[in-house]
């Protein structure tokens, strides 16, 4: 709880600051970019995993093809809670931020709007050394150390919610912060921790290095465990040109989502371009295709209309955040979740 209060104070520091018609031809999008258009400042997480690639492709390859927009100034940020702070401060027009920080900022008084999904659900799973633990129940009964990115972040809250859902005790589980996914994976392999959250492609790579298995898949425990959203300040959205820009960004994201789901070859080409990991950029079909199938068919990470993004759907996860102390549960979701720009984008795409 102390960490989460620090995060809220950290977020509060910024309070004073202020598609193409079809999916064809996307490989040549960059060549069609309008270099004379508006340059939007969009803050995103510096590390781009397999699940992040479609939004990155939408921003970097699709958006510049829309009339009036040049390639955006994509602002990579190492620590995801800082993305929301930059939007609040006015340093970024839009942010690809995490749900926990976005909602905590709203509770702290920031007038933000969630206008889209960076992707649906989460691609992270909780992985354990199968020689020691074969299930979440085993972790709860035997005890152990779980490394998470941050106390109060969406995966820490998710795991606590699953423990509660299945009536499993938490008193023997020690949560520690370890920000880098690479550091968490190395800690798991060395036996310094017993379980860690990691992306599905990281798990696929890890399996060849030892006896590891997943003990929690969030998409099997929740209808939608939202983790990343597209956010903007309400005052920024008051200007006509900014509302139009928000629609353009969402059209770009939806175009990339739809093409990802429909065309594995196109997705693979975008991974080679925009994934952060050298191993992932060079992944062959044996690794990447099962990851793509999991993202598209099991997790439903790239919905063609972002239909999951509703106040009612977000309301289902608020009690989990509230129970862990990550949120107070005072947010007016009908105000914060604004689908109007998304609906306009869907209309224009047809």
Image (cartoon, rainbow, N blue to C red):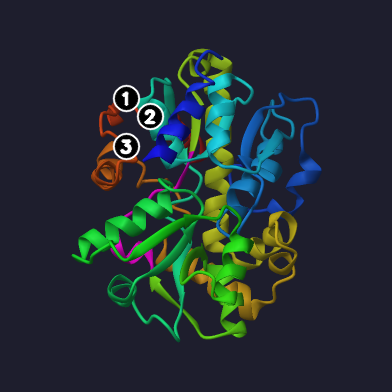
Mark 1 surroundings within 10 Å by alpha-carbon count, few (fewer than 14), some (14 through 19), many (20 or more): few
Could you tell me how far apart the alpha carbons at marks 2 and 1 are, in whole angstroms?
Answer: 7 Å
| Residue drawn at the location 52% of the way across and 39% of the way down | 97
Considering depth in this image, is 139 or 114 the residue closer to the camera? Answer: 139
Q: Earlier in the sequence, mark 1 or mark 3?
A: 3
Discs 1/3, front: 3
Could you tell me how far apart the alpha carbons at marks 1 and 3 are, in whole angstroms?
Answer: 17 Å
Which SS class for mark 2?
loop
Instruction: Using the image, tell me which numbered label, if any, was put on residue 335.
Output: 1
User: Magenta span has 219?
Assistant: yes
Where is residue 348 shown, x and y percent of the image? Answer: 50, 34
Where is residue 181 shown, x and y percent of the image? Answer: 59, 60
Marks 1 and 2: in contact by CB < 8 Å? Answer: yes
Considering depth in this image, is 243 or 221 the residue closer to the camera? Answer: 221
| Bounds of the magenta segment | 217-229
Could you tell me how far apart the alpha carbons at marks 3 and 2 are, in whole angstroms?
Answer: 20 Å
Circle 3 residue = 327
User: Magenta span has 248?
Assistant: no
- Quarter placement of the N terminus: top left
Q: Is residue 74 visible?
A: yes
């Amino acid at each position: 709880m102390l960490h989460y209060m620090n995060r809220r104070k950290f977020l509060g520091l910024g309070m004073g600051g202020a598609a193409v018609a079809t999916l064809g031809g996307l490989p040549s999008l960059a060549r069609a970019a309008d270099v004379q258009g508006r340059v939007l400042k969009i803050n995103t997480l510096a590390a781009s995993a397999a699940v992040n690639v479609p939004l990155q492709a939408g921003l970097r390859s699709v958006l510049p093809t829309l009339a009036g927009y040049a390639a955006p100034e994509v602002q990579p940020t190492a620590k995801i809670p800082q993305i929301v702070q930059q939007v609040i401060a006015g340093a970024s027009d839009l942010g690809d931020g995490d749900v926990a920080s976005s909602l905590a900022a709203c509770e702290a008084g920031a007038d933000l709007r969630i206008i889209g999904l960076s992707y649906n659900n989460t691609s992270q799973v909780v992985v354990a050394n199968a020689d020691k633990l074969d299930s979440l129940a085993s972790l709860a009964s035997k005890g152990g150390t779980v490394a998470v990115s941050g106390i109060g972040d969406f995966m820490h809250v998710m795991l606590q919610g699953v423990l509660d859902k299945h009536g499993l005790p938490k008193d023997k589980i020690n949560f520690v912060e370890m920000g880098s996914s690479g550091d968490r994976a190395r800690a798991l392999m060395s036996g310094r921790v017993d379980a860690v959250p990691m992306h599905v492609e990281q798990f696929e790579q890890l399996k060849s290095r030892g006896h590891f298995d997943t003990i929690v898949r969030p998409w099997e425990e929740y209808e939608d465990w939202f983790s990343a959203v597209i956010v903007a300040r309400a005052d920024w959205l008051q200007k006509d040109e900014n509302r139009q820009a928000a629609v353009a960004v969402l059209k770009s994201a939806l175009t990339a989502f739809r093409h990802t789901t429909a065309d594995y070859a196109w997705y693979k080409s975008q991974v080679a371009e925009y994934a952060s990991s050298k191993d992932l950029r060079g992944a062959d079909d044996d690794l990447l295709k099962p990851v793509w199938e999991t993202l598209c068919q099991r997790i439903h990470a790239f919905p063609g209309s972002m239909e999951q993004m509703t106040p009612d759907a977000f309301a289902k996860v608020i009690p989990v955040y509230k129970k862990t102390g990550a949120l107070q549960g005072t947010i007016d979701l009908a105000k914060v979740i604004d689908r109007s720009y998304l609906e306009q984008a869907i209309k224009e795409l047809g």
